[in-house]
Amino acid sequence: MNNNDKIINNNALIGTGSRVIIKLIKKEYNYLLVVNGDVDGNGTLDLYDIYDIANYLYKDKNKLSGVYLKAADYDGNNTYNL
């Protein structure tokens, strides 16, 4: 499922906020995905993501949260920067 709860088909991109759901007979597993750098959840790192990260860093700390904030750490060094 993508971040809008729609089933991902064929060659569609998987973005931040997408979920993998594995259903077994007695249990269900839900995994929330993070794509490094993809803070808007569209599956790509583009200028919109860079703008959102810059906005978070310099203007509005409330702009990103949860998995989208985790995606802002695009290089895995536990810091948010451009």
Image (cartoon, grey):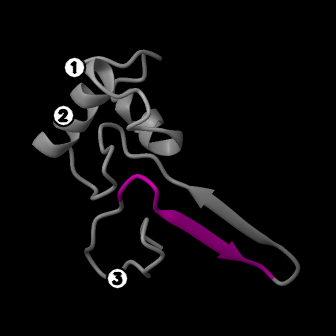
* Residue position for label 3: 9
Q: Considering only vertical position in the picture, is 78 above or below 29?
A: above
Q: Earlier in the sequence, mark 3 or mark 1?
A: 3
Up-down: is 58 above or below 69? Answer: above
Q: Is residue 46 visible?
A: no
Q: Nearer the viewer, mark 2 or mark 3?
A: 2
Secondary element under disc 1, as helix, strand or loop, is: loop
Assign a secondary structure to mark 2.
helix
Query: CB under 8 Å between callouts 1 and 2?
Result: yes
Give the label on residue 82, or none: 1
Which one is earlier in the sequence, the residue at label 1 or at label 2?
A: 2
Amino acid, disc 3 = Asn
For the record, the magenta segment spans 15-24
Q: Amino acid at mark 2?
A: Ile
Which residue is painted at 41% across and 15% down in the image?
A: 79
Q: Where is residue 50 drawn, in percent x and y?
A: 18, 34
Residue shown at 41% from the left, 38% from the top = 64
Comes first in the chain, label 2 or label 3:
3
Residue 61 screen position, x and y as percent: 41, 26
Q: Position of residue 30 (x, y in %)?
A: 66, 64
Instruction: Give the quarter of the figure containing the C terminus.
Output: top left
Residue 63 to residue 29: above or below: above
How far separated are the C-alphas under marks 1 and 2? 7 Å
Which residue is denoted by mark 2 in the rendering? 50
Name the residue: 31% across, 20% down.
57
State the separation of the CA atoms marked 3 and 1: 32 Å
Q: Is residue 24 left or right of residue 48?
A: right
